[in-house]
């Protein structure tokens, strides 16, 4: 689906250029295509949909792929902070390691990371793509009792009149702030903000820290690689490409 013209009602920081999509396809795939075709750093793709909040941003890393993938955690932190800023107060926004986002314990969606498939681990990639897909409405999912493990922005009382554009704006601002913290205080500051949102119980509760190449140390020092789990996309239905309900 070809992107439509920019939406003048969405106000983003100047470093971002907005592309709005309508119809089928995913923001992630659109951003990957744009990144692979040339200089599209800072492009933020937003696919407007009644059922999903779906957006992706193209990043320009300045370190080798092995460590640059840690940008994923910055994206997840910015996503959680944007969701938290627009939802009912005092409701926890948490992660299941590494990519699933939960709201008050129910699965809401998650994040993804893409990178050039031919880039070596020791090479600086030309681009990275961070993408988020959030369940905006479960109106088409039937009886809520059939999908008790997930929730939606609509069900949780988020204001959805603008197609959730306010959350996209908030994400862009939080992402800039998160990278600024990384530059000033080091990745450890992002690590702390990510880890404190890990859900209690299950594998997430055993994670102790994230090392320089994004692997996690858990279970008393055992290493768990990041690449395999990012490729798996735990929150996504492999048949539909959309969040699990």
Image (cartoon, rainbow, N blue to C red):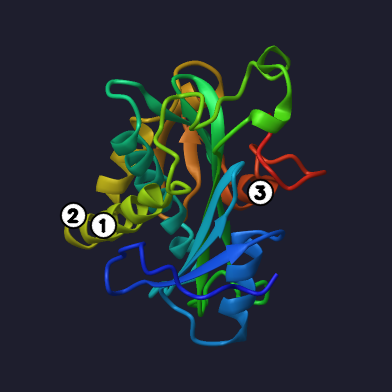
Above/below status of 182 relative to 141? below
Q: Tell me the residue at 62%/19% (across/down).
A: 149
Residue 14 image label: none
Q: Check disc 2 and report the residue beneath it.
A: 185
- Choose top left, top right, bottom left or bottom right for residue 116: bottom right
Q: Is residue 102 left or right of residue 30?
A: left
Give the image location of residue 72, x and y in percent.
46, 53
Which structural element holds mark 1?
Answer: helix
Q: Is residue 85 left or right of residue 127?
A: left
Q: Check disc 1 and report the residue beneath it.
A: 182
Nearer-N-terminus badge (2/3): 2
Q: Is residue 179 left or right of residue 7?
A: left
Residue 228 image label: 3
Residue situated in front as seen by the camera: 238 or 203: 238
Give the image location of residue 232, x and y in percent.
69, 45
- Choose top left, top right, bottom left or bottom right for residue 195: top left
Kindly report the distance in space between the C-alpha atoms of the residues bearing marks 2 and 3. Answer: 28 Å
Q: Is residue 140 left or right of residue 88?
A: right
| CB within 8 Å, label 1 to label 3 | no
Q: Tell me the residue at 55%/87% (across/down).
A: 38
Residue extending farthest to the bottom is 38
Give the image location of residue 13, x and y in percent.
27, 67
Residue situated in front as seen by the camera: 237 or 179: 237
Q: Tell me the residue at 33%/30% (across/down).
A: 196
| CB within 8 Å, label 2 to label 1 | yes
């Amino acid at each position: 689906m070809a992107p439509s013209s920019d939406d003048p009602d969405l106000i983003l920081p100047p470093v971002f250029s907005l592309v709005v999509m309508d119809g089928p396809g995913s923001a992630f795939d659109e951003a990957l295509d744009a990144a692979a075709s040339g200089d599209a750093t800072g492009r933020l793709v937003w696919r407007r949909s009644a059922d999903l909040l779906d957006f992706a941003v193209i990043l320009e890393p300045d370190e080798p792929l092995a460590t640059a993938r840690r940008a994923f955690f910055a994206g997840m932190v910015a996503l959680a902070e944007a969701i938290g800023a627009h939802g009912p107060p005092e409701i926890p926004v948490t992660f299941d390691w590494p990519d699933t986002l939960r709201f008050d314990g129910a699965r809401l969606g998650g994040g993804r990371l893409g990178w050039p498939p031919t880039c070596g681990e020791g090479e600086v990639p030309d681009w990275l793509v961070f993408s988020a897909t959030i369940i905006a409405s479960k109106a088409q999912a039937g009886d809520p009792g059939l999908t008790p493990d997930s929730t939606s922005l609509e069900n949780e009382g988020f204001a959805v009149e603008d197609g959730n554009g306010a959350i996209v704006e908030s994400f862009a601002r939080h992402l800039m702030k998160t990278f600024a913290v990384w530059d000033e205080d080091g990745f450890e500051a992002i690590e702390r903000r990510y880890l404190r949102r890990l859900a209690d119980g299950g594998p997430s509760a055993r994670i102790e820290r994230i090392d320089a190449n994004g692997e996690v140390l858990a279970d008393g020092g055992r290493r768990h690689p990041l690449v395999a789990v990012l490729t798996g996309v735990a929150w996504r239905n492999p048949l539909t490409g959309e969040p699990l309900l």
